[in-house]
Image (cartoon, rainbow, N blue to C red):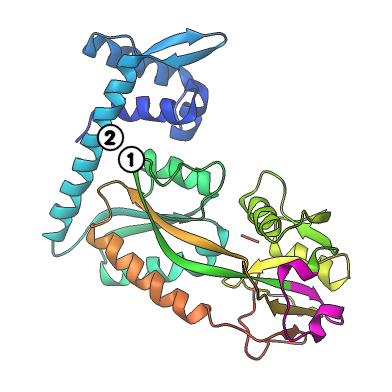
Amino acid sequence: MIDPKLRVLQMVAHHGTVTAAAAAMHYTPSAVSHQLRQLAAELGVELLSQSGRGIRLTAAARTVLRHADVLNAQVERARAELAAAVDEPAGFFTLCGFSTAASHLLPPAAASLRDSYPHLNVRVIEAEPSRCFDLLLAGDADLALLTATARTPPSSDQRFDQRPLLDDPLDLVVPEHHHLTGRSRVTLADAADEPWIVGRPDSAYHQLVMTACMAAGFTPNIAHYADEWDTGIALVAHEFGIILVPRLARLHDDLPVTRIPLRGEPAPGRRILATTRLGGRDHPLVAAALDNITTTAATLLPAPQPTVQQGGQLPGAPQVAPS
């Protein structure tokens, strides 16, 4: 319904370079450049100018983008209204999210949509938060579950509708006989002097842990890097350090570790956002997916007591594992 060349301009503005925009859209850089030249010729304005070795959006391009955002939002509202009038949805509907969401929240929602609407082709894409925004902007996803990071657009970004969905507390996982397991109350600051296991510096999980620790008044002593929960928990079991895990995450290994709910102010956690393109929030398939996700999350987020992970499923704690 909207000239696809406007989408190309949006992606270039979003990524800052033709090459990055082309990669996100699975185009070649020459194809992106060609579409931008066509759009500029149709509008009779210059859209890009050279800035050193890179490019810069012209004032005309920013004007076009401002109007494109309004047009895109209106198209999303129209699609939502039309979908509400259809008895049997068909076509494609895509959910995306970071790994914990993609593992535990999105599959039940996708299955519910598939079973309710046999003619609907439902897809799930696991992706880091910044990539989820790319998928939404490119029209390759309809609903994203993500956490805000330093690399994601602000909540004021007029291209997206970002709303809090649920809060996911962070729990501490320590070796089975760690000195913190005997306490009735543990805060994140109590673990300030411990060796820490975190995700790689460019990961959303790394940013999450660093932010939580700094809010508690310390910078963690990073001993090891692990992007997969299984790796991190195995390191904890062998007494190489401690790790923070979201309560939604699950541990699959039968290892001698203890999972401790943290107390105090601030209690560490992450806020999970449900994000659509602006105007797409009222789409009936989005609403149905969010209803299912909220119900699933409620069953996975009971507040556990400190429990030892050993020899099978733990009483009172969802067995858990980095996003």
Q: Amino acid at mark 1?
A: Gln
Tell me where the magenta segment starts and ends, as one range. Answer: 173-190
On the picture, is 211 further left or further right than 10?
right
Work out which quarter of the rendered image holds the N terminus and state it: top left
Q: Amino acid at mark 2?
A: Asp
Tag 2: Cα neighbours inside 10 Å, few (<14), some, or many (≥20)?
some
Location of residue 122 by image quarter: bottom left
On the picture, is 51 further left or further right than 322?
left
Q: Nearer the viewer, residue 93 or 40?
A: 40
- Image location (x, y in percent) of residue 32: 41, 21
Give SS at disc 1. Answer: loop
Location of residue 170 by image quarter: bottom right
Q: Which mark is residue 158?
A: 1
Residue occupied by mark 2: 69
* Residue 56 visible in the current orientation: yes
Tag 1: Cα neighbours inside 10 Å, few (<14), some, or many (≥20)?
some
Q: Which mark is residue 300?
A: none
Q: Contact, CB < 8 Å: mark 1 with mark 2?
A: yes
